[in-house]
Amino acid sequence: MASAIFVCLEVVLELLFPLSLLGFAILHIWLAINVIRVRRREKIAVGDEGHDGLQRAMRVQANFLEQSLLPLLILLLLFQQDAVLAAGLLSWLLLVGRLLHAHGMSRQDEDFRFRVAGMMTSFAVTLLAPIFLLLQFV
């Protein structure tokens, strides 16, 4: 019984990071669809034509990509070094941070608490991930 629980726990831990990547993919697609939706509604095929809502949607998507890429790359390296628990937990923390930031930034009547919480969480993961990676070599 105990070994079956241990095997199940091990499988869950191994899947934390890959499942978070699915979450990142879904969020990226959702943000892209939001840009497309605003483009269609406003009939703007290229650029933003100075439209505030489209500029905001484009920046939310771009910021998501800009702030996710480096920590995800480091987390992938961490995962490949068999630090699956650290990579999994930090990737989910990063995903929550990017969700909070996207939510806060998407709204015309911004609540900066979401943006700040998302930024701080993302920055924390961006700093912690390479520290954990370096510790794998010590």
Image (cartoon, rainbow, N blue to C red):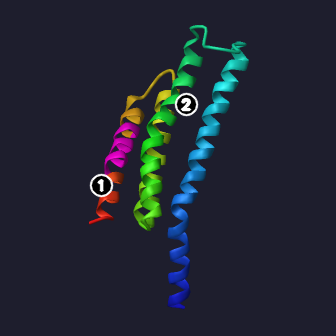
- Any mark on residue 61, and which? 2
Q: Nearer the viewer, residue 125 or 83?
A: 83
The location of residue 29, given as percent across then percent down, is 64, 38
Q: Nearer the viewer, residue 128 or 52?
A: 128
Residue at disc 2, secondary structure: helix
* Distance Cα–Cα, label 2 vs label 1: 28 Å
Residue at (69%, 25%) from the top-left corner?
37
* Magenta-tinted stretch: 118-128
Question: Where does the N terminus fall, quadrant-wise?
Answer: bottom right
User: What amino acid type should be assigned to the residue bearing mark 1?
Assistant: Ile
Residue at (47%, 55%) from the top-left corner?
76
User: What amino acid type should be assigned to the residue bearing mark 2?
Assistant: Gln
Query: Would residue 105 be counted in the magenta stretch?
Result: no
- Any mark on residue 131, and which? 1
The location of residue 30, given as percent across then percent down, is 64, 37
Residue at (60%, 13%) from the top-left corner?
48
Report crowding for label 1: few under 14, some 14 to 19, many 20 or more residues within 10 A (C-alpha): few
- Determine the residue located farthest toward the front in the rendered image: 137
Question: Where does the C terminus fall, quadrant-wise?
Answer: bottom left
Q: Is residue 17 above or below residue 13?
A: above
